[in-house]
Each structure stands twice: as structure tokens, then as C-alpha cells.
Image (cartoon, coloured by chain):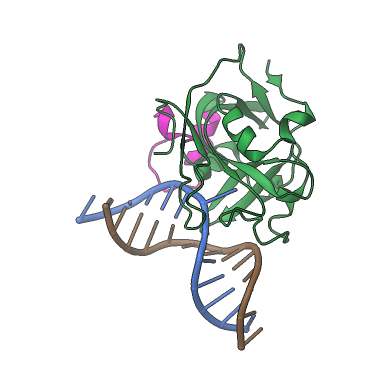
Chain colours: A green, B blue, C brown
DNA sequence: ACGAAGATCTTCT
DNA sequence: GAAGATCTTCGTT
């Protein structure tokens, strides 16, 4: 059903190389025995020692430990008292870099993702506009039911993985400054699919 | 023990 | 377009 990427070498490259490479790939997670999937449309690379905006900049702590694992797991963190964000950890063990998934185009399990977004929220109606279902890191985690308990989980299992589209096409993308940070703004490490309606801004 | 900052989202106007 | 919600994490006392 899905063409899972289970080559370790895909994830042990540099975050800056992998971030654009993830565009057009599928992020898949099983929830309630159903496959939730989205086409990745927007990513940001966070690197180790030279990147002041990265959680790993000041070294390994209890919170960012997953970032320092070998590429191929996810790093989930809690932010602004409200939201979770999910990253694809990249590079060799001990480096501390990752790619933040910022936006996706819903692909399958859309109804369940709508419910997950709606549940425990104050809104009166579910989100029926696909363009607004997964266009932000916090929204993605809500829709996919991702929280702290998923931190450090492997992408080589059957419940959580990255897959290739069939056929894998050449994606045109733009490269801009990252969003929502105050340090290291000069690095243009945000990658988004050109002309996509499924991005955060 | 305390305080400030933070890779966001929603709800106003 | 601006601001408030909300709370964990980490550095400082």
C-alpha cells in the first residue's frame, strides 16, 4: 500500500539535504487501526552547533535527547503551553539535527484527522477545508495524535514511517528564512513546494 | 524555588 | 493584524 523508506542512509544525511528531499514524500502514522497520511509540503532544517535557533545548540538535555540519536527517529516537543511539533531526526548519532515538518496536504484518513483536530477544541464544526487541516506544525500533531509519548520513536516500524509517492516526481520548491524564530534568521533553511496551497503562509 | 522564553494557534477587531 | 492562552524547560538564585 505504501512504499516505506526503510533505508537508514536516507536519514543519516545532513538535515539541510534531507529537508528539501522530504517534500512530496508521505508522512504516515497508524491511528485506531487506520492509516493517516499526508504529503509533506513544507519543512525546516535545524542543525547542531552553528544554529542558534536549534534546540540542540547548547548541547544535549533531557528535552532534546531524541535529536541526538541517529537519524531515523522522531523528535517531539511541547511549545507555548499548547502545542506539540514533530521533527524527523537526521544525521549521525550525537550530532543533534532534525527537520521540522511544518505543513502537509491531507492524503488518507482525512475524516479521522478532522475528528482529531476537532476533539477537545472549542470550535463548533470540524475543519472541512483540506488546506487548513495540516498547515502548521501544531495542527499536524493534533491531527495525527502525536504527543510526548511518541518522542524518540523509530521510523522503521509499521505504525510510523516515511513513504515515497508512486511514481516519485521531481518537486519544484522555494527556499526562505525560517518562521517563528528570533535567532539565526539569516539561514534560509525553510523549504516549501512551489505554488502549493497546503503551506502555513 | 523563580522567572523568562518559546520551531504556535485561535480569536478577536 | 494584534494579542492572549497556556505550561514546560532550563538557567539563574
Regarding residue A119, the answer to whether it shows in the image is no
Query: How far across and down, in percent of the image, does residue A101 sit?
Result: 57, 38
Magenta stretch: residue A124 in it? yes
- Residue sitting at x 69%, y 58%: A63
Task: Reply above or below: A20 against A123.
Answer: above
Visible residue check, residue A137: yes
Is residue A139 toward the left or the right of residue A57 in the image? Answer: left
Q: Position of residue A61 (x, y in %)?
A: 72, 61
Locate residue A65 relative to residue A142 in the image: left or right: right
Quadrant housing residue A201: top left
Task: Please check the rendered image and state whether residue A59 is part of the magenta-colored stretch, yes or no.
Answer: no
Q: Nearer the viewer, residue A47 or A163?
A: A47
Magenta highlight range:
A111-135
Residue at 62% from the left image edge and 12% from the top image edge: A166
Numbered-mark total: 0
Residue in the image at 39% along x and 44% along y: A123
Q: Give how far across and how far down residue A86 sits, in percent.
A: 61, 43
The quadrant holding residue A45 is: top right
Q: With B13 as the anchor, is A15 left or right in this view? A: right
Q: Among all residues in the image, which is located at the extreme top?
A: A167
For the N terminus of chain A, the quadrant is top right
Amino acid at each position: 500500500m505504501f512504499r516505506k523508506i526503510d533505508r537508514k542512509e536516507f536519514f543519516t544525511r545532513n538535515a539541510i539535504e534531507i529537508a528539501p528531499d522530504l517534500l512530496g514524500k508521505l508522512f504516515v502514522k497508524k491511528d485506531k487501526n487506520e492509516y493517516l497520511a499526508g504529503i509533506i509540503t513544507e519543512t525546516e532544517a535545524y542543525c547542531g552547533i552553528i544554529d542558534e535557533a536549534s534546540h540542540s545548540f547548547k548541547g544535549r538535555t533531557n528535552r532534546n535527547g531524541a535529536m541526538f540519536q541517529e537519524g531515523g527517529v522522531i523528535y517531539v516537543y511541547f511549545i507555548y503551553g499548547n502545542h506539540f511539533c514533530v521533527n524527523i531526526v537526521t544525521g549521525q548519532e550525537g550530532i543533534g539535527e532534525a527537520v521540522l515538518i511544518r505543513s502537509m496536504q491531507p492524503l488518507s484518513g482525512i475524516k479521522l484527522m478532522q475528528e482529531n483536530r476537532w476533539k477537545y477544541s472549542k470550535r463548533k464544526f470540524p475543519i472541512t477545508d483540506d488546506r487548513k487541516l495540516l498547515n502548521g506544525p501544531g495542527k499536524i500533531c493534533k491531527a495525527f495524535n502525536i504527543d510526548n509519548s511518541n518522542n524518540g520513536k523509530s521510523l522503521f516500524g509499521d505504525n510510523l514511517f516515511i513513504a515515497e509517492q508512486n511514481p516519485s516526481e521531481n518537486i519544484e520548491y522555494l527556499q526562505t528564512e525560517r518562521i517563528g524564530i528570533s535567532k539565526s534568521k539569516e539561514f534560509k533553511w525553510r523549504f516549501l513546494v512551489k505554488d502549493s496551497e497546503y503551506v502555513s503562509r
